[in-house]
Amino acid sequence: MSPILDHLRADDVINMEENDRTRAARTPQDAARELLDILEAKDYRQTAMDSDAFVWAARKGDVDTVRRGLTEGVGVNATLYGSTALHEACIGGHDKVVELLIKNGAELNVTNKAGNTALHRACINEHVKVVKLLLKNGADLNMTSKYGYTALLIACERGHGKIAELLIKNGADLNVTNDDGDTGLHEACRWGHDKVVELLIKNRADLNVTNKEHKRPIDVAGRLNRDTQLLLETETRKQAEYSELVSSVGSEEGTTVKLFLCGDGQVGKTSLRAILKKTGFIVGAFWNIRRKFRRQDVFNPTPGVHVSSKAVTGIGRLSLHDFAGQAQFYVTHAMLLRTTNAIFPVVYKITDGEDEQKRQIHGWLSFIYCSNADPTNKPRIVLIASHGDKLQDRQAGLRRATALVEHYSKLFLESLIVSQEVFLINCMEARSPEIRRLREVLAAYRDDMMKKRPQVPKVCVQLLTEIEGWRKKRKAFPVMKWKDYLAAVRQATSYLTERIVQLASSYLHDEGEIIYLYQEIDSLLVLDPKWLFTSIFGSLLAPDHFHIDKIARTAEDYVTLKEISRVFSAVADIPLLIKLLQDFQLCHTYDYRTFILPSLLQQEMEEAAWSTVSSKAVYFGLQIRGRTEIDSFSCDLFPRLQTLLMQAHPHKLSRPLLWKNSAKCTDGKAEALLQITQDRRQLNIIVRSNDGNREDCNSIMDLLKDMTYRLLQETSPGARSRDMVLSALDLREHRPQPHAYSREEVEAAASKGENLVHPQRNVPEKVKDLLWDLGNLEGMSGRESQKRPELVETLPHISSREEVEAAAATSEDFVHPQRNVTEVKDHPGNLKVSAEDLEDLIKRNYIQLGKRLQVSDLFPHLIQRGLLQIDEKEDIDSRTNGRRKAEALLDLLSRQGKCTCDEFVEILRVGNHEHVVDRLEWSP
């Protein structure tokens, strides 16, 4: 490079600053690129202004030169090789140039040779500012390129979540298909773009549309992380079932909205429920008179959930659910919180300390959010500060309530709709101005929900009418076996098939109208959730201070059959009740005399239960944690996980040891410890083999991991989680809070062949001790390692300037040290890009190259240059379709390392693939 720079400097082609900048480049490749940019810039700046120079200036983001071109009369829509100045400015993300061109009348929707508009070009490299400019000025966001790609399809294909969200907000068609019949969801699923998939599901994309190969998005979703794949599977099934239900007998508008009163104990929910319904003047006045003679210190707690239905004046028909505020009941509350057609008033006491208020509010909002089973639904929240009459300084209380509303509105902005109205009320006073204002807010929420919610399948409305009659006949025990229920439905409505009855019952379960967990032919169905949550769960889970007939527990926190029979003597069928509780994963028994209810366990695990063992022992640990501060796991996750561990005995696991928030189990080869934190934001799975056998650890970890992930999706469908790797050093030393490394930390260390340094202890940890997790944790290896088996090969080799110049001086090749491949022999002044860079280029553009290449046009040129052998051509030709042929060729070129980027691009050009070159994405 030095002789070239000397000549250019002597001829005054470059100045001293440009000379120094080029020589300071880190590698010969960087120096060559730097010099090329300098010479290109000089070329278009020093040439008399014409359309070519004008487009070049736009490509480089040179606002002054573009402005000069416009002044000198160059057409704003001038083209170079079919692309306008606006196209080139957009691909480079030059928002200032884009703005200038638009102001001067640039056509926004003109296409280049590949059929791409400026918006397409901006989306390719995720230039958000440019996309906003184009949309603001009227760019057509649903125009398709030569191969049927809209801007949204491009964003989905490349995983550009911010661009996709922006396009959707501006009305992009979610379900438009390209020439292959793929929607944006197909593309995002195929290439493992989890966040884009979640975004499309949230915005009600069609999950069951099929492409030309008759595949739905779920059928091409092999690269998604576990939690995203489970979400997609669930929503695909639900969407298909809803369509099937509606197509059977039609649909109609719903009429009832549920009101779920949430909050801790003694905050005033029950009183609020009462005064919300007292709308008349006389009724309200009578209530207010009576309350003056009531004892203020009397507390009548709600056991379980109190349910009542009423048409409330000014609001409409409501189904009011008053949730008990005691933590013991949260495990069952989760079943109802997954309902989508509900409004959630969250009540807290304004007289509590600020930290306690935040703990309660944050806990309930996170509980509601993580329980939300419908990603297209944002639960509606009203924060209510009670005990306003107890304040000495009402204005100070109002300021605090306002601050809490503002804080949680921002914190849960993307997940919940938190009303901006501030309520500071006395829950004992009927018809107060605050209560009237609360009714207005609830009425507005209800009307908005009724407009936006999908219509209710008619078959469900008809079925619910029959169920209401059966509830009255079975008041003592409103539970039916599936076969009896199905027979009753067929007798009432003979035209319904078993499949439709099953789907309709599942729909009513999701709406909270019945409790139905279809598992097998002997499944049970609860006709009246109110009975279950109040009469059963109320007595089963009530804490000691509840003055009701409740279950007594043994010293080990177990419950006996005798005690269950005593408390539920009014229930005719005790065995059926026990089966019901087992189906809900609330209890388990080994002998049918003693029952273990994990949610009632109070004993903490002793340190000796998980103590040091053999020095040969190996440890591995997975931590599943909430992705953000609003993500937590549902209250029923860990108790149900403990039940699953018991149910796995004796076929898969030995009988587990259980404590509050902990469990220990073994499969006979390795043992495991599972623990969840008090705030339900972190769940650790630690496995160890006393004999040092990694495969044994692998086996039990896979079992527990699969069990946990599936239950997590069922119990906490709205929560977003991430996987962490626990420090093996901390695990071996049995530290109570082992450090957790992120996926990115482990991958970065692995790619560099370095150790990890424990941040608290400043001690190095060998990455190989964690690589088991890297290979086994779902999503841990990421998309890059799926393409490249060895992480250490992810970084391109960089040859030093001395290596290149020495090889050039002796007219020798130099050999790539990692791949044992001869690099390009050329003078450093004419240095070509190394073959390693071609591999990177192919990986960066693998998706679109696989779709666009017509390999038959390229074969002659590849064979002529010695880059393809006849037998290799025949092997590629044997593939079944064009995409597979193209991918086989790309894999071959990457693997061989013979072809440079320059040669590859030249072959594309001479092989009639100019349109492909136009879409290539280069590294920054």
Image: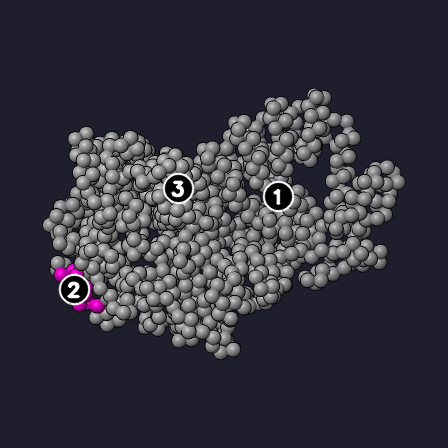
Badge 3: how crowded within 10 Å, few (<14), some, or many (20+)?
many
Query: Which secondary structure, mark 1?
Result: loop
Q: Are discs 2 and 1 less than 8 Å apart at CB?
A: no
State the image coordinates of residue 698 (x, y, percent, origin top left).
Answer: 46, 69
Residue 50 in the image, given as x and y percentages of width and height: 72, 26
At label 1, the amino acid type is: Leu
Q: Quadrant of the C terminus?
A: top right
Q: Residues within 10 Å of mark 1 (few under 14, many from 20)?
A: some
Snapshot quadrant of residue 100: top right
Q: Earlier in the sequence, mark 2 or mark 3?
A: 3
Q: Magenta stretch: residue 265 in it?
A: no
Disc number lying in front (1 or 3): 3
Residue labelled with disc 3: 416
Which is the main secondary structure of the residues drawn in magenta? helix
Mark whose residue sits in front, 2 or 1: 2
Q: Which residues are magenta?
A: 560-569
Of 51 and 911, nearer the camera is 51
**Which mark is on residue 565?**
2
Amino acid type, callout 2: Ser
Decide: few, some or many residues near mark 2? Use Cα within 10 Å; few <14, some 14-19, many ≥20: some
